[in-house]
Image (cartoon, helix red, strand yellow):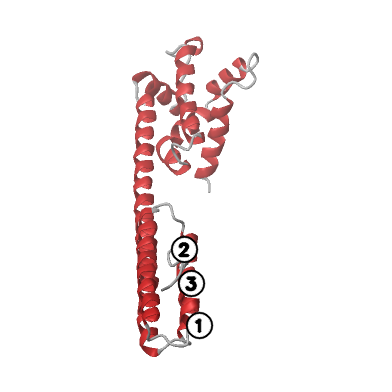
Amino acid sequence: MISDVQQKSKEELMEEFAKKTDHNTLEGEQYLTTLMVKCTNAAASSFHQSAQNISLSLGQCAQSITFSIEQFRQTTKVLGESSDKLSKKIFWLNIILVLATIVGVGAATFQAVSQIKEWNNVQEDRKFSTLFRLEDRLLNSTNQSIYSATEHNKPILKDNGGKFSTDDLDQYLNDLTSIESAYDRKLIDMSSAYEWFAEYFEMASQNKEVNDYLASIRKESPDYYDGFEAFSSEINAYGKR
């Protein structure tokens, strides 16, 4: 009988088995049976763990395959010292183990790619939801009228002959600054921000009345609407690439 069979690893059993001078004995059959069970369990465990571990990286996948192949290489070395009949049996057991590992890694990689694709879809949905919400703010009648005034270089504030209060202009600039905030929080990307809102920033940042208003309020708060100005420069630079 093989002593401490449950406590010994597959590799230890193979090493002991290779040292035996006669494999066609009851003890030899016990070694073979035990090895078959351990190889099968190892294959099943490798497949299950790989399939369930969705976050397994490609580097870890490669390591898993390399490890199994190395085990296979060591086994074939041991097989050179075994009888032909038993060698073939163990040879095919290890072939199954290596294939099970590769299949398991493939399953884990497929699931990881599927999860990444699903995550990208979620991110894309969130981006468009944010873009529509930001655009909706700019499409209200007051903001559209201010945008039109900046586009056609017409007076904006009532003090300058326009139709709007400083509160109205503040709200317009705040809504533009919300776009910059969404970009900083990575809710939208620069390409989308440029495609959807570049004209708003270009017209506002180049409008003399808007710049005069910013200069006047910065006498008390020097950093007022810094985000708006910084993002205007960034989005304009993006368009000139």
Q: Badge 1 is on which residue?
A: 19
Q: Badge 3 is on which residue?
A: 11
Q: Amino acid at mark 2?
A: Gln
Mark 1 nearby-residue class (10 Å; few <14, some 14–19, many ≥20): few
Q: Amino acid at mark 3?
A: Glu
Q: Badge 2 is on which residue?
A: 7
Q: CA distance from mark 3 to mark 2?
A: 12 Å
Question: What percent of the width, then of the height, locates residue 47?
Answer: 36, 62
Q: Residue at x 57, y 29 (%)?
A: 229
Camera sees residue 40: yes
Q: Amino acid at mark 1?
A: Lys
Secondary structure under tag 1 reads helix
- Find residue 168 and report its image quarter: top left
- Find residue 84 and report its image quarter: bottom left
Mark 3 nearby-residue class (10 Å; few <14, some 14–19, many ≥20): some
Mark 2 nearby-residue class (10 Å; few <14, some 14–19, many ≥20): few
Location of residue 139 with respect to 72 vertically, above or below? above
Q: CA distance from mark 2 to mark 1?
A: 19 Å
Q: CA distance from mark 1 to mark 3?
A: 13 Å
**Label 1 with label 3: CB-CB less than 8 Å:** no
Relative side of 189 to 125, left or right: right
Location of residue 69 with respect to 236 vertically, above or below? below
Q: Earlier in the sequence, mark 1 or mark 3?
A: 3
Relative side of 81 to 34, left or right: right
- Find residue 230 and report its image quarter: top right
Nearest to viewer (mark 1 / mark 3): 1
Location of residue 131 with respect to 1 vertically, above or below? above
